[in-house]
Image: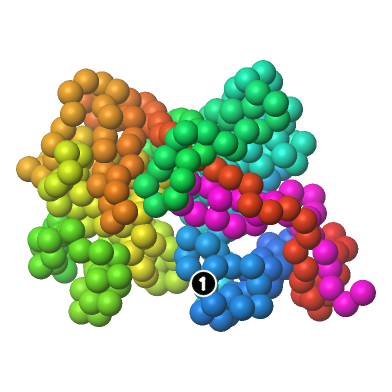
Amino acid sequence: MTQTAIPFLFMRGGTSRGPFFNSADLPSDRETLSEVLIAAIGSGHPLNIDGIGGGAAVTTKTAILSKSKDDWADIDYLFAQISVEDRKVDFKPTCGNILVGVGPAAIEMGLVEPKGDKTDVKIRAVNTGAKVIATIETPDGVTYEGDTMIDGVPGCAAPVGVTFMDVAGSVTGSMLPTGNTVDTIQGIDVTCLDVAMPVVIARAEDFGKTGYETASELDEDEAFMRQMLAVRLAAGEAMSMGDVTESVTPKFAIISKPRQGGAVTARYFMPWKCHPTMAVTGAQCIASCALMGGTVAEGLVNKPDGNPAQMIIEHPCGSIEVLVDYTVMPFSIRSAGLNRTARKLAAGDVFVPQAVWNGVK
């Protein structure tokens, strides 16, 4: 046999999708693991024609699951972002959309036993150390059919509730990595915030944008993309993240006033393309920026009453809602919750050449 078969589930989580693996079925060393993921996805071609990727950053993601080594958690979730064309794997960030599929996948893999009509799965995001509780509909095993809709995904599915805890400083160790609520970088005012994901946030108008452009309009504006990416690189240095030229973090977002009754409008970058909808982790960071005083969001936000605050972030395909439990003086985030959906799309084996990995751990 000239290829190695690796069991996998193919899952949609939120507005992303990709293969979900049991870590026991993969090589343990990171270098070989990266080559296996590159081969499985087909990285190195714009269509991922020799793999199961989808030719976009939201469809070249991978989740690797195992029983947790943490006393609090049930599942350890290792995320990998595989590039579409560059044959690179980034293990630094996590992904909140793919995380939505972790609970259902863990039950499907037999790593977690369902408990009644609803099952809480405690997840530790290995990449960042974040702790998340996912609530899965399990009246008779995992149920995928339901009436919950999320913008960016057609149709309806069963809800998956996700509650993120201890999200401040998840990557850099500080909610405000530069120590400031606003920094001026290359003539652009930005808020460098680390809540669930480090994100550099700026006002759209400061780039000469409305903030209501489509994702493709922003991607095709080469002058804007060059300027935005230059600010991101400088911000990465200011956030003590070093040279982020080849890293997907920090992410970038531009914000503007809401137009559809939400709290704020945002366009989120991954970072080399605009997200077609909104990242789950990015939404938490943008919501926190909108709630915190003295940031670049000042004067743009329609703040909701009450705490926890139901923050509706408008994005290119609609909106996403984040329930943020926070304190004001001093500002801190206790937890952030969202309702998303997931669906199992396929199951079986993905094959990689034996020259990449012969299956021996």
The colour scheme is rainbow
Q: Which SS class for mark 1?
A: loop
Query: With respect to residue 342, does 231 lie above or below?
Result: below
**Residue shown at 20%/49% (left/top)?**
265
Query: With respect to residue 32, does 238 lie above or below?
Result: above
Residue 293 is situated, as x and y percent measured from the top left of the image, at: 15, 36
Query: With respect to residue 231, does 333 lie above or below?
Result: above
**Disc 1 marks which residue?**
55
Residue 236 is situated, as x and y percent measured from the top left of the image, at: 33, 61
User: Which part of the image, by quadrant, shows the N terminus?
Assistant: bottom right
User: Which part of the image, by quadrant, shows the C terminus?
Assistant: bottom right
**Residue shown at 18%/29% (left/top)?**
304
**Residue shown at 68%/39% (left/top)?**
106
* Residue 149 left/right relative to 260: right
- Is residue 101 in view? yes
Residue 352 is situated, as x and y percent measured from the top left of the image, at: 77, 71
**Residue shown at 44%/50% (left/top)?**
153
Q: Across the whole image, how many numbered discs are drawn on residues?
A: 1
Residue 3 part of the magenta-drawn span: yes
Residue 288 is situated, as x and y percent measured from the top left of the image, at: 27, 38
Toward which corner of the image does residue 117 lie, by quadrant?
A: top right
Toward which corner of the image does residue 125 lie, by quadrant?
A: top right
Q: Nearer the viewer, residue 105 or 150?
A: 150
In the rendered structure, which amino acid carries the disc numbered 1?
Gly
Q: Nearer the viewer, residue 181 or 260?
A: 260
Please report the bounds of the magenta region as a residue range: 1-27
- Is residue 226 in view? no
Residue 119 part of the magenta-drawn span: no
